[in-house]
Image (cartoon, helix red, strand yellow):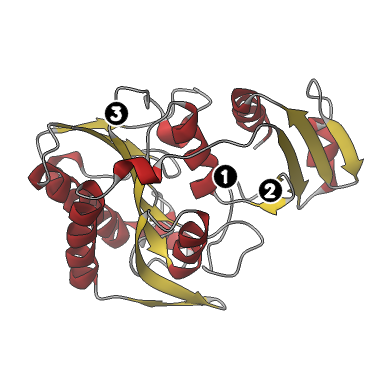
Amino acid sequence: MKIFISADIEGITGVTHWDETDIHKPDHAAFQEQMTAEVAAACESALQAGATEIWVKDAHGSGRNLVAAKLPQAVRLIRGWSGHPFQMLQELDKSFTAVLMVGYHSPSGGGGNPLSHTLTGWLAELRVNGQRVSEFLLNAYIAGLVNVPVVFVSGDKGLCDEVQIFNPSIVTVPVKEGIGNSTVSLHPHLALSEIREKVAQALQGDLEACRVVLPRSFRVELRYKDHYHAYRYSFYPGAVLKDACTVELETNDYFDVLRWLLFTT
């Protein structure tokens, strides 16, 4: 069993302020440790469930957050950013058995996390076929593109509720809840225990029920906070400026969407 884990930080237990997510700020260190611990818990549980190979993508900010020495030796850690359109799922292909997402968060325009965003702070909202989407959904569609099921997600309650609506077979662990500009979090050790238990449940469950079916076509709207970003990216081939702050692209190929997002976010 070959497992892929994509790890972010805004959905990690206790993370509440942008300073705690920034590798250049002193507040980052404690939450870097917790991010590493939550990923390690997922890895350890996957190994106990029968995984023989685990790849982890450090998918936050610089891509240099996880402490490699504190992960199991079976892990291959992907640090930094290659520039491939899969971004947070770089190196994922059909050889993997399942995808796990750790530390994920609510989207731009959502209220589930003080740090809610999608891909970049530039975006006020990202919609696909009229639906506001999170990084979870964007990456779930990547998994669907290579036919690998997404079986587990941990993060804030708002996102976990979204995941359950999308596919109730995906196992979720809400480690915190955003309330305005605050969070209410599980104790860090309890979060690790929950992640271990639920990853095992996910990998021993019905993986086929967690496969993602892609829409037949995609109408992607990027609404920027600043109008000049929309103007600039409206010159991308096939893009249309819908209003001062919104650019739209229509395509039948999800890889076209990913390539567009790589250059516009």
Amino acid type for the residue under numbered disc 1:
Leu
In the figure, 134 relative to 233: above or below? below
For disc 3, the neighbor class at 10 Å (few under 14, some 14 to 19, many from 20) is many
Amino acid type for the residue under numbered disc 3:
Phe
Q: Which residue matches tag 1?
A: 119
x then y, percent, for residue 107 = 58, 56
Residue 221 can be seen, yes or no: yes
Q: CA distance from mark 3 to mark 2?
A: 28 Å
Q: Which residue matches tag 2?
A: 126
- Viewer-closest of 115 and 24: 115
Which label lies toward us, 3 or 1?
Answer: 3
Residue 150 can be seen, yes or no: no
Residue at horizontal 53 percent and vertical 69 percent from the top: 112
- Viewer-closest of 35 and 53: 53
Q: Which residue matches tag 3?
A: 96
Q: In terms of sequence position, does the residue under pointer 3 or pointer 1 come before the other?
A: 3
In the figure, 56 relative to 41: above or below? above
Residue at horizontal 59 percent and vertical 70 percent from the top: 111
x then y, percent, for residue 173 = 33, 64
Is residue 74 toward the left or the right of residue 8 in the image? left
Give yes or no for contact between labels 1 and 2 (Cβ–Cβ under 8 Å). yes
Q: In terms of sequence position, does the residue under pointer 1 or pointer 2 come before the other?
A: 1
